[in-house]
Image (spheres, grey):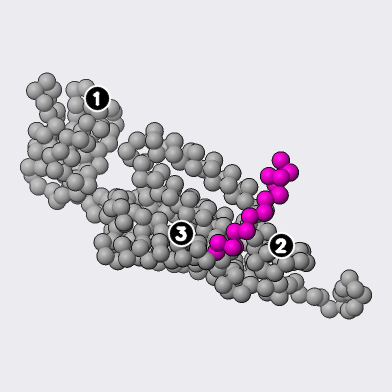
Amino acid sequence: MSKLLNINIDFMRARRLAFAISAALLLISVASLAIQGLKLGLDFTGGTLVELHYPQAPQLTEVRDQLETAGYENFVVQNYGSSQDILVRLSQGFSPEVGEEVRSLLSSDSEAIELRRAEFVGAQVGEELRDQGGLGMLVALACVMIYVAFRFQYKFALGSVLALAHDVVLLMGFFSLFRIDFDLTVLAALLAVVGYSLNDTIVVYDRIRENFRTVREGGPRDLINLSINQTLIRTTITSLTTLLVLFSLLIFGGEMIHNFALALIVGVLVGTYSSIYVAGTLLLNLKISRDDLALPVKEGVVEEDGRP
């Protein structure tokens, strides 16, 4: 157990390789977001809502397969009220015939499906709300910078915000590159990843600040390595236990929270990597030193060597 606690991995030795990997992934993510953007789900785009009643509870996977075979794209199928009632949300615009088309498609000779309603449903997240959400994110990042600069030092503030932006861009780039629906559940996961990643980075930064003030030997690279190794057990255990739950949700949680769990899994992996490599590498590039974290000496206080 003592050997496990005395981990000594030279993480900063591979910082240039990690920096190159991050730069390449960021370039791919930004290019994908700029060229093809996000595949926005129905929460952002709106569409048509069809409510159906089955004589017996249907298998939602079979309903989805039937719709996909018929050529429908970007749709959501879920139970509504009971296992016999389902809601089908389609990305296409509303027309008087669409409800009957879906009912006829899903009906079979052995059962008659009742069409309860078919209507247009607007986007839950409109353009104004998206703009306000983006502005809110920028304000939140500014508040984080102010807090970290006040709590630590301005170089730590820049490092934490840049590491946070790194994680957000990579997560959004992942959904853009692989054309996975970006809906409200994914947006909620994105905000959760922001909090998770920031907390992980702050834990590492707090240990770096402590070691810069208390450990007398070694330069900035050695002290950052020491700090990352000291927090590695905590970071690893937290990430593994979180991923264990998230993979359970991904496998057994069903269609509705599949993308939510996937976004959190990618976010936790990226955030863990970021707190180990990106945050520390940024501090080295910002030329962090002991003088930046030295406590001010109060007037009249005598130092250890007896000098005032």
The residue at the point 39 percent across, 35 percent down is 251
Q: Residue at label 1?
A: 57
Q: Amino acid at mark 2?
A: Glu
Q: Amino acid at mark 3?
A: Asp
Q: From the viewer's perspective, is the residue at label 2 or at label 1 nearer?
A: 2
- Marker count (numbered): 3
Q: Magenta span: helix, strand or loop, mainly?
A: helix
Instruction: Classify 181 as above or below 215.
Output: above
In three-dimensional space, the C-alpha distance between marks 3 and 1, rounded to whole angstroms, equals 42 Å
| Residue farthest right in this picture | 306
Q: Quick one: 153 or 221, which is closer to the camera? A: 221
Earlier in the chain: of badge 3 and badge 1, it is 1
On-image quarter of the C terminus? bottom right
Residue 183 lies, with reference to residue 246, above or below; the image says: below
Which mark lies nearer to you, 3 or 1? Answer: 3
Mark 2 or mark 1, earlier in chain = 1
Quadrant for the N terminus in the image = top right
Q: Is residue 109 magenta?
A: no
Span shown in magenta: 1-15
The question of residue 6 being in magenta is answered with yes
- Graded by Cα atoms within 10 Å as few (under 14), some (14 to 19) or many (20 or more), the crowding at tag 3 reads many
Disc 2, SS = helix
Vertical position of residue 104 compared to residue 144: above or below: above
**Disc assigned to residue 210:** 2
